[in-house]
Image: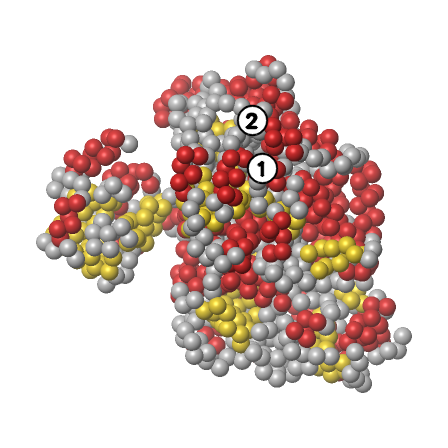
Amino acid sequence: MTYPIDYRYTEDHEWIHVEGSRARIGITDHAQSELGDIVFVEVPQIGTEVAAGETLGAVESVKAVGDVLAPLDGKVVEVNSILEAAPETINDAPYTDGWIVVLELADPAQVDRLLDAAGYERLLSGS
Amino acid sequence: MLAAIGVESLDALFSDIPAAVRERFRPLGLPSRSEMEVAAWLEEMAGANAGSRLVPFLGGGIYDHYVPSVVSSLVSRSEFVTAYTPYQPEVSQGTLTAMFEFQTLICELTGMEIANASLYDGATALAEAAMMAERIRGRGRIAVARTLFPQFRRVLDTYAWGADLSLVELDYDPSGRCEFDNPADELSAVIVQTPNAFGVIESLQGLKRRIGDALLIVSAYPLALGLLEPPGAFGADIVVGEGQSLGLPMGFGGPLLGLFATRKAYLRQMPGRVAGRTVDTEGQVGYVMASQTREQHIRRARATSNICTNSALCALAATIYLSSVGGDGLRSVAKKNLENAHDLAGRIAQIDGFDLAFDGPFFNEFVVRTAEDPDAVRTRLAEGGFLVAPSKGLVALGVENALRIAVTERRTKAELDRFVDVLGGKR
Amino acid sequence: MKTIFERPTSDGASSFFPHADAPRPGGEYTIDRELLREFPPRIPTVSEPIVARHYTELSKANFGVDDGFYPLGSCTMKYNPKINEAVAALPGFTDLHPLTDAASAQGILGLLFELTDLLSRMAGMPAVSLQPVAGAHGELTGMFLFKRYFEERGEPERSRVLLPDSAHGTNPASAAAAGFSTTEIPSDERGMVDIDALVPELDETVAGIMLTVPNTLGIFEERILEITEAVHTAGGLCYFDGANLNAFLGRARPGDMGADVFHFNLHKTLSTPHGGGGPGSGPIAVSEPLGEYLPAPRIVFDGGEYRLDWDHPRSIGAVHSFYGNVLVAVKAYVYLLRLGDEGLREVGENAVLNANYLQARLKGLFDLPYDGTCKHEFVLSAQGLPNEISALDVAKRLIDFGVHPPTVYFPLIVREALMIEPTETEGKASLDAFVDRMERIAAEAGSDPELLRSAPHHAQVRRLDQTRAARDLVLTHRIEAPKT
């Protein structure tokens, strides 16, 4: 299992890659492995405003559904369109091509509340 | 066996039930009986249903259609009857293949892209359609034709109250058809039934365009769809119906068969099970339950419906019925219904004191206005060996002094002749 | 497996129905062309012999209780007596239209009335409705009753339903469908509701609790009276999911445990067949305060006659077109008459004996997360098996031995769960044979794991690709357009 060091993480197994005032969001290698083969991804509409903790979308495998929760307050500015035809991209490349949404952050300081790579690894080894 | 478990007595295995509970138990006072005795007793009970021996001119959503023997023979095979839900697809290819066939047949009949593998009955199918439309549009309000069968409306009212959904009623015009005069409010859906509670075939032409972006939900009579242009052709978003007419007995109203079909784009909002085609590890075609993540066993509180057990064996009966009868055969039997009903309606209209209540087109059911008290007419018909529906259903819809008459392919020339005679007071 | 659409078609029309007579005078009519199909539905015409062979072949690709041992936990796959089927097929029942006058339907109304009374007394609760046609349907109806009850009492803030983390998926789904939110209560180390976690949740926003008794681990809630009393004291109601009634037939009643609503699964406990997924029947019994809200009509007996009583102004309305799945109710009625009190008690005893016996013999072989007296079912875990063999692999290999797999991956609180419910139908020989097969599978997990991972080997198909089914959804057959 890999956890890019320069990414941030949540307890719900999302990763966040900060790009200036924006954050690219996806689910971690652990999450995609638990879900199994991903068959469908529910993405929000561009322009949707979310608060941290609200549901952004969902990732569906054959046997389970994982909600994708907004880790931070913000507005959806991009969604990954290749996931419609190729949802398995999340299984193959969860941290790169398998990104799900990009948020324009309302308050970039909230990033500090997120786990860093070491913190996420500790979370996983604890469970 | 007790030794293997490590206990002294059977009672020890029930000590986990609190003594206070066990002490309150009361038996039923029922002796055990032999099969022979029970069979005799039940034959007597079945014999006490005189209505099963009268000739039914009774419809209202449940019809006396002829079911070919091959249907009941095949559907009673124990591998179908005593199996459970196909959670292990490798040993359930029979059930799953038949589900796939059923879905295909219902799509063909209704003119829609996808269908589920059945719901409980036409009434709950309609209620589920309303819930689904609300999930999609979220406006909290649905317009409903007044001319739904009362059993559909009752259940819809209950489910709508349960979901805090408000219903606004659309009245009917003198032809017996629903009036759609552009309801001003924003709606999640518009619900119409065809043929409706008066037996009148609704005009769906152009309706979809007139209702904004509300979903169009149509409840249809499946056997009639052998002849009538299906709701899908008119742009319906969801088509539901009562499938009893496709190879099921009347059975005093249950079990029944809920049909549900919709657009492919709405798959994720659709309730109920659905079978999908796939392959096995050797590339052989097989079937599995698809899109299970919509369902309660995975989604739990966020499932599209709580439904688990549905009406699978009834769906199988419908599948075998349709496969046996074929598309040409279905159109032919539907035509026979149409002809018998129009024949009878024409003859009744010529009897003094009777006339057709509505001039809208009808399939196999129509409403007749009577100069006499309709209950007196019913009594006379019953004495002549014929059953028609009580008039109170029509009164509730604002039609007084009338009776609704249904005529299926089972009604013979002799029965129709005698019906006309009895109605006219000749016997 | 070919579908009916891939079978040879025939040219001749079937002769199931007589041909249309020529229209008679007064029988002419016109119907708008726009209302009619231009072509018949594209359903192929297949001859009767081919239909018979096709569905016979399909049936052989199925596995029912009549084919062999079917220990599907939570489903109670007991033998379905054939007398039930014969009685339910009597024309006196099948040829009856639901709108027939009561006077002409005394036989069936009497049967339904008596069944209602029997179920009421089995539950130890005063009123019963036969309208719900499945367990989940009974649950939804029960949730509607909760909603109406609190509406009438002016307590709309009671919007939460509590349920254990071992609950069947229909429980939260039903609560949600009636507008309730759900709160999960963890199970303790013995598999029962953790009362210390329950009590703090019992505030004025709680409508009640949904319990399965015994629970989905097959364990009886020993503190059931405490739980229901606590909920009642907090002003809530108790819903009991009766899927596991087989465990205490003839020994205990939910009404005596504090239930306010209890649903029966006639297609589980009372031997009516499962039919591949229904039709079932899920009648509900209710406590006194909820009686007036039950669906209408109700079947009553007065003046020497049975009739349908619609006069229930406080009823929630209706949840089914008519009176429930009548022909299914007939089968359950026959079963009850056959068994009587003695038979019912024996059913419960043998169901529990069989389950405890299997548990004792299998617990050395597989992990048993909750080791104590079980009721009619128990849950093993495949986690301890070597080579990461999963519950799914065990299930698929059982197919090769002519046994239907147990329920897998439920309840959610046990990893790699295998839920085994033998029912009272099985004799010791059948149970011992099952143990032998499980022993063999446990051994194969160590010696030949690939055999398990690629199972089944002897079924109609090999292991099916669920992922492909979900990604490339094909839900209908593309029927070719007819040659015109």
Kind of element beneath mark 1: helix
Residue at the extreme front: C233
Question: What residue lies at 43% left-to-right and 43% top-to-bottom?
Answer: C202
Question: What residue lies at 25% left-to-right and 57% top-to-bottom?
Answer: A50
Badge 2 amino acid: Asp
Q: Which residue is mark 2?
A: B16
Closest to the observer: A21 or C292? C292
Q: Of the residues tagged 2 and 1, which is closer to the observer?
A: 1
Q: Is residue C262 above or below residue C158?
A: above
Can the viewer see residue C344?
Answer: yes
Q: Position of residue B314 (x, y in %)?
A: 62, 52
Kind of element beneath mark 2: loop
Closest to the observer: C54 or A102? A102
Question: What residue lies at 64% left-to-right and 75% top-to-bottom?
Answer: B397
Left or right of C459: which side holds B1? Answer: right
Q: Position of residue B283 (x, y in %)?
A: 42, 41
* Residue C87 falls in image quadrant: top right
Instruction: Locate the C terminus of chain C and report the quarter of the image it occupies.
Output: bottom right
Can the viewer see residue C22?
Answer: no
Q: Which residue is mark 1?
A: C257
Q: Say whether mark 1 and mark 2 are on the same chain.
A: no
Badge 1 amino acid: Met
Chain under disc 2 = B
Closest to the observer: B146 or C366? B146
Q: Position of residue B63 (x, y in %)?
A: 69, 63
Q: Is residue C450 above or below residue C80?
A: above
